[in-house]
Image (cartoon, rainbow, N blue to C red):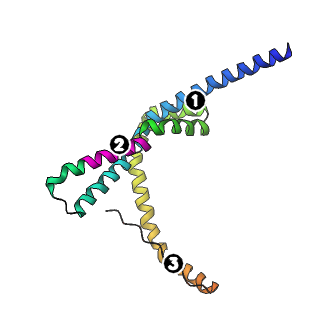
Amino acid sequence: MTALRSLCTAALLVGFSSMALADSSAEAEKFLKQVHADRLTVPVYAQVQQMFAQHFQRANAPDSKKAVLDRYQAKANAELDRAVGWDKIKPDLIKLYTDNFSESELKQLNDFYASPLGQKVLQKMPRLTAESAQLTQGKLQTAVDPVNKLLADMDKELGVKAPAAPAAPAKKP
């Protein structure tokens, strides 16, 4: 009888935890939809398309071969879809959010992003993020020379030859 009671209790707990997880997953999915997470990879697709277009240009390919570029860009999109298409990353994002937020917190996030202020945040955040990164990058440039001097001084004190500098990242236009 005790074993049966334990088994029933365990079954109920599993059932309740599955329902709670389903509720949390539904809230996480609602949140991801609300914040347009399905658009997260749009810049990646655009960057790959630009890379192919620049490669086409550098190859001095004639305009008459533009169909070749278009075909390869479509193939690249298909590869990206297989790797980071919404159907591929959505389950992982849902898990990420359900692992880090309770159902109650997800509901609060959903309520916030449904509010006028939340909508304003969603509208302005991409521009604010880009401008913040640009501002930080600009200010960071003032630290490059002093930090490089500190590295050189450390190498001198250690009595070692400075390692070869890594290739500088390409600057964005």
Three-letter amino acid code at disc 1? Ser
Segment colored magenta: 71-83
Residue at point 61%, 28% (across, down): 21
> Which label belongs to residue 78?
2
The residue labelled by disc 3 is 148
Q: Residue 141 location in percent, x, y?
A: 44, 71
- Residue most extreme to the right: 2
* Above/below status of 143 relative to 1: below
User: Is 82 contained in the magenta span?
Assistant: yes
Three-letter amino acid code at disc 3? Asn
SS assignment for the magenta stretch, majority: helix
Q: Secondary structure at mark 1?
A: helix
* Above/below status of 34 relative to 132: above
Q: Quadrant of the C terminus?
A: bottom left
> Which label belongs to residue 24?
1
Marks 1 and 2 sit apart, C-alpha to C-alpha, by 31 Å
Q: Residue 10 location in percent, x, y?
A: 75, 22
* Above/below status of 72 relative to 33: below
Q: Earlier in the sequence, mark 1 or mark 3?
A: 1
Which quarter of the picture shows residue 57?
bottom left
